[in-house]
């Protein structure tokens, strides 16, 4: 079955091990909580077409391992990402303290213009909270990140996190701030795009390259 969409955005999910990155992706794709989630080995992949402001956008999402031993592998996937979910666990200050390192990696290895949404996951564990909403929202503001608290367990704000990031990218394309034709922009025109005829050859090739890496 052929898929029709206006744009394809490459997304990353990054952050320390155990923060719930794979569960967030699973909740977004499958609409349910992933029971018994194991540490990701290297990188996992998921995709879903969403409607953003009347446009259909295929999100191609790379869920990276948080464990240090996979860092050199996961770093090789950063290039050409248009958006990222940067995840910490609201019940673990350690994962919050690591955010600056993840942020530096994303901006240097993906793109300085990458659109990032900070996700304080495990919002359902409010009783064990170690990071306040206010503190994290200040950090987000200082670092020009969007911010939401999410729960992959209940599903709260999960869809919203991906959509908010996609909406921002789309509005930057429409305002001319982001150029999909720039090399490694992380954005491709899809089959439904009026630009398709002009760009289909190049985009399909790049797509294959990205999926095989
Ligand atoms: N209470 C609660 N637990 C969660 C939530 N999201 C994930 N978990 C649990 O946190 C643990 C780690 O989740 P994963 O999604 O595998 O974490 P990860 O960030 O992908 O970890 P790595 O792949 O090692 O980087 C699992 O035991 C999940 O059940 C959440 O929103 N609430
Ligand atoms: Mg994982």
Image: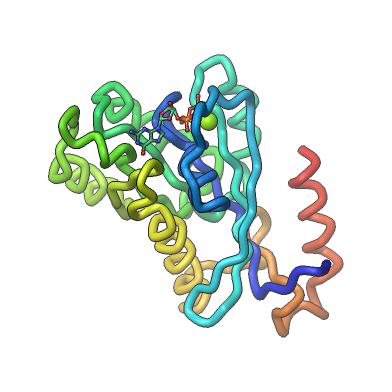
Q: Residue furthest bottom?
A: 194
Q: Residue furthest top?
A: 69
Nearest the eye: 190 or 143: 190
Q: Is residue 130 visible?
A: no
- Tell me where residue 76 sits by quadrant: top right
Q: Where 47 falls versus 50 (above or below)?
A: above
- Give the left or right position of residue 77, taking residue 200 as reference: left
Say which quadrant the N terminus sits in.
Answer: bottom right
x and y percent of residue 178 in the render?
52, 67
Q: Where 148 falls versus 202 (above or below)?
A: above
Number of numbered tags placed on the structure image: 0
x and y percent of residue 64 in the render?
56, 33
x and y percent of residue 192 in the render?
72, 79
Q: What residue is at 82 percent from the left and 61 percent from the top?
A: 204
- Give the left or right position of residue 60, taking residue 99 as reference: right
Say which quadrant the C terminus sits in.
Answer: top right
Nearest the eye: 42 or 98: 42
Q: Is residue 24 visible?
A: yes
- Give the left or right position of residue 181, taking residue 113 as reference: right
Q: What residue is at 19 percent from the left and 28 percent from the top?
A: 128
Q: What residue is at 45 percent from the left and 24 percent from the top?
A: 17
Colour scheme of the picture: rainbow
Nearest the eye: 213 or 29: 29
x and y percent of residue 28 in the render?
50, 52
Q: What residue is at 18 percent from the left and 31 percent from the top?
A: 129
């Amino acid at each position: 079955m052929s898929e029709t969409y206006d744009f394809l955005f490459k997304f990353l999910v990054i952050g320390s091990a155990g923060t719930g990155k794979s569960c967030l992706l699973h909740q977004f794709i499958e609409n349910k909580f992933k029971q018994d989630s194991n540490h990701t080995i290297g990188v996992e992949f998921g995709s879903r077409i969403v409607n953003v402001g009347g446009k259909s956008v295929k999100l191609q999402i790379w869920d990276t391992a948080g464990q240090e031993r996979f860092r050199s592998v996961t770093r090789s996937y950063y290039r050409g990402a248009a958006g990222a979910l940067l995840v910490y666990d609201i019940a673990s200050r350690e994962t919050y303290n690591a955010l600056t390192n993840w942020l530096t990696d994303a901006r240097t290895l993906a793109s300085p213009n990458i659109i990032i949404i900070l996700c304080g996951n495990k919002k359902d564990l409010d009783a064990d909270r170690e990071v306040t909403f206010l503190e994290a929202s200040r950090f987000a503001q200082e670092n020009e990140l969007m911010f939401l608290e999410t729960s992959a367990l209940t599903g709260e704000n999960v869809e919203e996190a991906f959509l908010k990031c996609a909406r921002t990218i789309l509005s930057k394309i429409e305002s001319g701030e982001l150029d999909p034709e720039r090399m490694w922009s992380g954005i491709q025109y899809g089959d439904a795009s009026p630009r398709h005829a002009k760009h289909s050859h190049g985009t399909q090739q790049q797509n294959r390259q990205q999926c095989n890496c």
